[in-house]
Amino acid sequence: MVRQEHNELLLRFYALSENDNYKKGVSRSFSDYLDRFLENKKNELSKLSPEQQKAINKYRNDMDEVLSFVNEFFPFGFRHTSNPQTKHSIFEAISVGTLLAIRMGVNKDKIDKDEIRKAINSKEFKENTHIAN
């Protein structure tokens, strides 16, 4: 299954954030995991009644909130530097982490952009996202 880069990043976000899948990890091929998730979602969404279309709106709202938050507070968007390439693990960490913060009710008035910059450049973040120092 061929996926364009932006579409794949969104697919990764949804596949990892749904049902806390980021906690479980993926034991086999991540590509196969994404293909299975996408196929299951297509089947599930094709059978939705009008009332169930709310699930689709939830996905849209989640992504809209994450995009807005990241655009407002992250210096390089879904990247850790000004490099134009988006590393998958960085996108996954920022997008899923941001969604969790939003769900926990983060107070935007107390967010310090310098703290976000420090966190993205921290040893722990680099180790967990496999960024070379």
Image (spheres, rainbow, N blue to C red):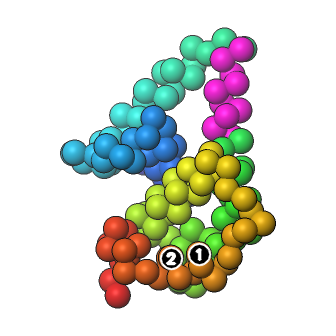
Residue 24's x, y, as percent? 31, 43
Residue matched to label 2: 119
Furthest residue in direction left, as rendered:
28
Residue 10 in the magenta stretch? The answer is no
Pick the front one: 46 or 54: 54
Residue 38 visible to the viewer: no
Residue neighbourhood size for the residue with mark 1, other residues' Cα within 10 Å, grouped as few (<14), some (14–19), many (≥20): some
Q: CA distance from mark 1 to mark 2?
A: 5 Å
Instruction: State the quadrant of the N terminus.
Output: top left
Q: Amino acid at mark 2?
A: Ala
Q: Are marks 1 and 2 in contact (CB under 8 Å)?
A: yes
- Which disc is residue 16 wearing? none
Vertical order, 102 against 76 (above or below): above
- 71 on left or right of 115: right
The part of the chain drawn in magenta is 51-60
x%, y% of residue 121? 47, 82
Say which residue appears at 49% left-offset and 44% top-offset: 17
